[in-house]
Image (cartoon, coloured by chain):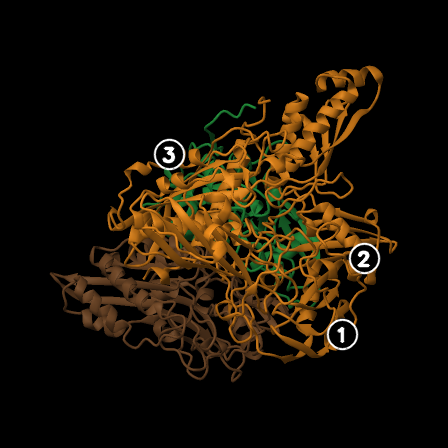
Chain colours: A orange, B brown, C green
């Protein structure tokens, strides 16, 4: 292997994307399409006393108005992750109760978008309001419920007796908070539902989980999955918020059946802020104890996050703690409170991201307290095993991430004192932090066809939301078949294709490429050929149109022998113009260990994307709700800032380590999320170095630097 | 967006006459703020009078040495005009600090003066708002008010004017030329926008039906010292938390004239007259700039979440004045 | 106004104003051909008549005159996407806050979500669909492809249209907020990263392909951008 794999290859879907030909969910042109516009609650808790739709119904062009009084027919799904999953357990329009501001309370359908939006505004609602709970600082936290059967508390060593009494020279105890963040993909949530004959439906919707979405919608509309087709060739960004149906999707699909017309629903940017997921506010307290050489003797990590009244989602911040640094004594605890907010959900490195902000900040604080270089402190405490699973890590090169990054960044020139580096009138700070993310994979299938025109087709119901999946699948096939990448055609994002798994948990590449590898090997076996050229020759001889093979790939027993994680280190330089509280990030180096790198171009972009979203979290991203009504006051892309071009320096990305062949036959671990972990800590650590000011509450807006 | 009738004005007189006879009519030119507002039902005009094709697109030097900017000159054309870059660099810089290239290409000078606050409570009909509808209340006073006014606000409204251009125009002593059915009149820029008082629904002192036709920039001999400093949550494409326009005329070692205007802090571009007066006759040094900044903010009344703006404004003034004292440029 | 200027259409005059008095430089080598003769052949149908309800308007898009029947409240973006099937221009925020809907109007970049379609009659509109020829991508499109200036692709048409306009703006001597000396505009050959970033900041990218986009602009400007690929430090054989 290595003719194509590991090279820098342009995206297979690139031409479609740079010419505007790539067609996203709500862009499919369907004859007779009508438009739906959502009506959302303007209160955060209470109930609808009256809802008057007469005026809206009388508006020109209006076809239907749905409210809790006449909800479209929907079936309750099993919602058990395995067969189906919806983001919010409460079905839309199921009653008149309001649990959060922005909750969907109606859908207006009209012949044009403008008319639907206008009519939606004319619906008059009287509410019974109740006092809202939207303040995360004052919320009532309880022990978090488990989401996947995992234990939300963990104690090892001295903590079993509840005694945090290790005799140490240094301790750090600090509380770190992160604000509510939204995924804010560039493509809004949007879909078109097209029914035929009342017994089959095609849903054009961006989804990170094509087959899961198919099964879920099938349950919701009471049809077998084969009567539901999901079409999702392109996804305009997801980051965790486009994996399962949201209430608007359920409403669109069920309403379309009732009106017997193809229906498009686009969630407005404002509505999205409230009702299509977010990352919860987190508050984490970390205690570290170490001897004077910096050897950790105890870590205690308590994390609080919030969920909605209509579903449970815990931001699992403590998952990273047993993975990073070795210690005999460890105590982890997750707590959860219910607020009148929409349901939070997975957002790029859920748990790992805020968790690493807290842990890597605390490690930096400990390094300063002990006067030990922060890289050295991490090297001294590296763990070779997953302390909770008690399994050794496979193909771990964390230390090389640290040392390689230090060299590339020029870390050895760092002055070991805050406020010691200057550039003209600016304070300069250097910071670093570690990165980690678990390596996951699931059972998937891919089909490969060799055609007599000399091309190979790879078909699977995976998807590419910008990850580069089209390209790495083509590269895997090209490598295995001995064909140029140009001769491979990849089709994704259609539930008619074999199960391609979930683009989430950084697992699509790690799941799919082994299946593609196996399917390519299998099709060559079918053709009794060494490579594709031989197979093509046989096709020509026999007059056959194609050879075809389908193969699957799934995790096996390896999880009993090893723990699998990816690793990394970030190094950054900030400048602070202290008088006017102006912070800029001027330099960035990330070194990652992700097993095999399939495409050095798209993998670099994945890491950069993660780093930049982390910079957004560090510097500016935060949602606010009105304290009285619970209604969002940060609700669009002017009020919710995420980085623009001007905020971002060049980000140098390198990869270390060898393929992780214990993990899967491709040796690849995936890199969609690791890039964001540790980023915010690298920034706050650099700000401390620059200014002597420790920022423990994100984001670092100018007010926090005064 | 409510539906409306649409008409292209033939002439300024035609436009003014339509807007005077139909009080629910609105002018549209670049549309960058109005179309945005229409989409969220903040304005529900009966009629849109498209003035964008009228002849108000010139930048001309007048016989008094002023520069007359047609109301339909785009923000981009204004910022890039050679006379503006040479003689009013703080205006050029302020315009360039605002929005994005796309918006500046579309937005006009007249429209920029007419843009309304981005207070999130005003901007969403889910909330009551005195600016949208009188006597309905101001939830921003007790709500999230990090971006709100610290100067000149009232109990009925704590919104800020979002324009960057207007802050520079305030510092320049620009004059707004308007035309109504009664004819033309001129309004000094600093009197063009209003403080909210009990009538926050009115942003400006324009009379119904009046159309902005031009903005006049008087000559500014010390223009090279002009500075526009904008501080915000994102490095670009964001409204100001605080912005400052300054210029200094220094004769010998004494300040002869000072201009200090603030943005992002009040319902209108805020000219810090008392700070300017303090500086006259003083040396252009750090301690005087510090005192001037203190004076400029002495009447500040912060709300629960925007107290930082007081300190940030002072520091911005100090910095901008210091750069002006060095001869101006990028702050 | 000179006599010569009076003969020009208002739009041509405003273009002159934009250029200033002494700054006219040679036309953009990189701009799409359709942009170069942008101000000719205006056709304005519903001129100065009161429009109520749906009406027939004509829009000149990518060199072709398209007629459509719409209410005056329909934005240019919705007209493109919903009425004309030109979905290359993206609706990201619908409020001029993201840049995904960027198109070129008479060669200048604009947010198509913030203007009414009816207001654009007679103007030359270029969308992402109008940049490439049948055989060749526009050099900016190629530069995006080679420098990985996108991931999900949703902001990409807007980023590309903005980049095409940026190059022409720089050729025309335009300044930005970060131009140190406003009387000395930068040139393409030496356009700095901070200039590119400031000028592109009206186009957000949540996947954050910003490094690749800046590199694409550098390449299209005739500069040599750094490689978009990661460096691989260890043997990946296995």
Q: Which residue is mark 3?
A: A408
Secondary element type, mark 3: helix
- Using residue B22 as the reference point, say whether residue A49 is left or right of it: right
User: Who's the residue at 37% across and 57% down the image?
Assistant: A695
- Foreground mark, 2 or 1, reads 2
Secondary element type, mark 1: loop
Tally of marks: 3
**Foreground of the two, A443 or C171:** A443
Quick check: can you spot residue A373? yes
- Tell me which label, 2 or 1, sits earlier in the chain: 1
Vertical placement of A518 versus B55: above or below? above
Vertical placement of C234 versus B130: above or below? above
* In the image, farthest residue toward the left: B252
Q: Which residue is mark 1?
A: A58
Q: Which residue is mark 2?
A: A221
**Foreground of the two, A403 or A187:** A403
The quadrant of the picture occupied by the C terminus of chain B is bottom left
Discs 2 and 1 carry the same chain letter: yes
Instruction: Kindly indicate whether the residue at mark 1 contacts the one at mark 3 (C-beta within 8 angstroms).
Output: no
Discs 3 and 1 carry the same chain letter: yes
Quick check: can you spot residue C210? no
Instruction: Kindly indicate whether the residue at mark 1 contacts the one at mark 2 (C-beta within 8 angstroms).
Output: no
- Foreground mark, 3 or 1, reads 3
Callout 2: chain: A
Q: Position of residue B164 (x, y in %)?
A: 39, 63
- Using residue A596 as the reference point, say whether residue A53 is left or right of it: right
- Tell me which label, 2 or 3, sits earlier in the chain: 2
Q: Residues within 10 Å of mark 1 (few under 14, many from 20)?
A: few
């Amino acid at each position: 292997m290595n003719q194509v794999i590991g090279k820098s290859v342009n995206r297979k879907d690139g031409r479609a994307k740079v010419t505007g030909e790539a067609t996203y969910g709500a862009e499919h042109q369907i004859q007779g399409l009508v438009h739906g516009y959502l009506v959302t609650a303007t209160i955060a808790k209470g109930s609808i006393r009256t809802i008057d739709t007469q005026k809206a119904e009388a508006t020109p062009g209006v076809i239907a108005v749905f409210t809790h009084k006449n909800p479209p027919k929907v079936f309750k799904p099993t919602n058990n992750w395995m067969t189906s999953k919806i983001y919010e357990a409460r079905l839309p329009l199921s009653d008149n109760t309001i649990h959060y501001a922005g909750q969907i309370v109606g859908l207006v359908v009209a012949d044009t978008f403008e008319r639907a939006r206008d009519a939606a505004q004319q619906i008059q609602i009287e509410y019974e309001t109740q006092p809202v709970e939207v303040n995360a600082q004052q919320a009532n936290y309880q022990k978090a419920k488990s989401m996947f059967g995992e234990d939300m508390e963990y104690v090892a060593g001295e903590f079993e007796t509840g005694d945090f009494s290790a005799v140490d020279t240094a301790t750090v105890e600090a509380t770190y908070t992160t604000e509510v963040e939204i995924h804010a993909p560039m493509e809004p949530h949007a879909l078109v539902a097209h029914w035929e004959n009342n017994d089959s439906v095609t849903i054009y919707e961006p989804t990170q989980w094509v087959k899961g979405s198919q099964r879920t919608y099938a349950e919701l509309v009471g049809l077998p999955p084969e009567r539901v087709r999901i079409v999702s060739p392109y996804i305009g960004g997801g980051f965790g918020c486009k994996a399962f149906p949201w209430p608007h999707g359920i409403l669109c699909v069920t309403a379309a059946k009732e009106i017997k017309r193809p229906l498009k629903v686009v969630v407005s940017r404002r509505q999205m802020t409230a009702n299509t997921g977010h990352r919860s506010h987190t508050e984490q307290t970390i205690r570290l104890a170490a001897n004077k050489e910096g050897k950790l003797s105890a870590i205690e990590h308590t994390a609080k996050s919030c969920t909605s009244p209509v579903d449970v989602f815990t931001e699992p911040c403590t998952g990273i703690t047993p993975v990073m640094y070795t210690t005999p004594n460890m105590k982890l605890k997750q707590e959860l409170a219910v607020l009148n907010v929409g349901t939070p959900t997975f957002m790029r490195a859920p748990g790992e991201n805020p968790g690493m902000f807290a842990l890597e900040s605390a490690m930096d604080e400990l390094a300063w307290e002990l006067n030990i270089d922060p890289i050295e402190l991490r090297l001294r405490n590296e763990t070779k095993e997953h302390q909770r699973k008690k399994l050794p890590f496979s193909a771990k090169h964390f230390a090389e991430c640290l040392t390689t990054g230090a060299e590339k960044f020029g870390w050895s020139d760092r002055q070991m004192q805050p406020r010691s580096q200057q550039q003209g009138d600016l304070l300069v700070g250097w910071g670093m932090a570690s990165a980690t993310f678990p390596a996951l994979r699931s059972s998937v299938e891919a089909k490969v066809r060799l055609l007599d025109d000399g091309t190979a087709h790879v078909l699977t119901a995976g998807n590419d939301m910008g990850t580069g999946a089209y390209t790495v699948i083509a590269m895997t096939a090209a490598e295995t078949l001995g064909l140029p990448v140009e001769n491979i055609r990849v089709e994704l994002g259609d539930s008619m294709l074999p199960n391609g798994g979930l683009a989430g948990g950084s697992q699509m590449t790690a799941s799919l490429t082994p299946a593609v590898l196996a399917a390519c090997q299998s099709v060559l076996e079918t053709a009794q050929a060494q490579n594709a050229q031989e197979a093509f020759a046989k096709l020509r001889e026999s007059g056959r149109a194609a050879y075809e093979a389908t193969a699957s790939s799934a995790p096996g027993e390896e999880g009993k022998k090893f723990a699998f994680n990816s690793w990394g280190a970030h190094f950054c330089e900030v400048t602070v113009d202290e008088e006017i509280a102006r912070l800029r990030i001027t330099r960035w180096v990330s070194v990652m260990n992700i097993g095999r790198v399939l495409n050095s171009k798209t993998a670099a972009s994945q890491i950069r994307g993660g780093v930049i979203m982390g910079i957004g979290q560090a510097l500016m991203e935060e949602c606010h709700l009105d304290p009285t009504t619970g209604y969002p006051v940060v609700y669009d892309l002017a009020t919710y800032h995420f980085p623009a071009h001007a905020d971002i320096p060049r980000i140098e990305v390198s990869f270390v380590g060898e393929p992780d062949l214990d993990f899967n036959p491709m040796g690849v671990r995936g890199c969609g999320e690791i890039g964001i972990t540790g980023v915010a800590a690298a920034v706050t650590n650099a700000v401390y170095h620059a200014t002597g000011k420790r920022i423990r509450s994100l984001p670092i807006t100018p007010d926090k630097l005064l | 967006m409510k539906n409306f009738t649409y008409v292209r004005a033939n002439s300024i007189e035609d436009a003014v006459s339509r807007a005077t006879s139909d009080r629910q009519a609105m002018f549209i030119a670049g549309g960058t703020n109005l179309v945005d507002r229409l989409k969220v039902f903040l304005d529900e005009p009966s009629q849109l009078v498209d003035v964008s094709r009228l002849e108000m697109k010139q930048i001309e030097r007048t016989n008094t040495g002023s520069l007359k900017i047609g109301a339909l000159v785009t923000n981009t054309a204004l910022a890039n005009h050679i006379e503006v870059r040479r003689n009013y660099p703080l205006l050029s810089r302020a315009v360039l600090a605002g929005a994005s290239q796309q918006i500046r290409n579309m937005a006009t000078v007249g429209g920029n003066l007419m843009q309304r606050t981005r207070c999130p409570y005003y901007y969403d009909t889910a909330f009551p708002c005195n600016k949208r509808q009188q006597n309905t209340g101001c939830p921003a006073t007790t709500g999230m008010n990090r971006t709100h006014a610290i100067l000149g606000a009232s109990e009925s409204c704590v919104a800020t004017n979002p324009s960057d251009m207007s802050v520079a125009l305030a510092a320049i002593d620009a004059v707004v030329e308007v035309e109504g059915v009664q004819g033309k009149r001129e309004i000094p820029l600093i009197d063009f926008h209003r403080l909210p008082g009990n009538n926050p629904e009115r942003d400006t002192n324009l009379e119904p039906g009046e159309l902005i036709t031009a903005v006049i920039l008087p000559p500014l001999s010390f223009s090279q010292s002009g500075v526009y400093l904008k501080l915000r949550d994102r490095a670009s494409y964001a409204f100001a938390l605080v912005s400052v326009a300054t210029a200094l005329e220094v004769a010998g070692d004494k300040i002869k004239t000072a201009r200090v205007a603030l943005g992002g802090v009040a319902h209108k571009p805020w000219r810090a007259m008392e700070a300017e007066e303090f500086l006259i006759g003083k040396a252009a040094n750090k301690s005087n700039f510090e005192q001037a900044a203190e004076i400029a903010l002495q009447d500040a009344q912060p709300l629960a979440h925007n107290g930082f703006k007081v300190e940030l404004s002072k520091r911005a003034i100090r910095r901008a004045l210091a750069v002006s004292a060095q001869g101006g440029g990028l702050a | 106004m000179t006599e010569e200027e009076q003969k020009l259409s208002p739009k041509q005059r405003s273009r002159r104003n934009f250029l200033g008095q002494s700054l006219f430089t040679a036309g953009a080598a990189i701009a799409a051909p359709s942009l170069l003769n942008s101000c000719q052949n205006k056709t304005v149908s519903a001129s100065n008549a009161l429009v109520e309800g749906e009406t027939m308007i004509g829009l000149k898009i990518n060199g072709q005159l398209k007629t459509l029947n719409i209410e005056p409240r329909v934005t240019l973006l919705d007209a493109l996407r919903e009425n004309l099937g030109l979905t290359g221009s993206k609706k990201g925020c619908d409020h001029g806050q993201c840049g995904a809907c960027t198109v070129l109007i008479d060669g200048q970049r604009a947010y198509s979500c913030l203007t009414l379609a009816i207001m654009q009659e007679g103007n030359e509109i270029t969308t992402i669909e109008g940049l490439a020829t049948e055989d060749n991508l526009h050099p900016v499109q190629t530069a995006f492809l080679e420098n990985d200036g996108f991931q999900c692709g949703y902001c990409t048409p807007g980023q590309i249209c903005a980049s095409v306009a940026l190059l022409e703006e720089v050729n025309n001597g335009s300044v930005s907020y970060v131009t140190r000396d406003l009387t000395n505009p930068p040139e393409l050959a030496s356009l700095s990263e901070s200039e590119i970033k400031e000028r592109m900041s009206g186009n957000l990218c949540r996947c954050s392909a910003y490094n690749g986009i800046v590199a694409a602009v550098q390449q299209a400007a005739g500069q040599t951008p750094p490689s978009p690929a990661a460096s691989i430090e260890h043997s990946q054989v296995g």
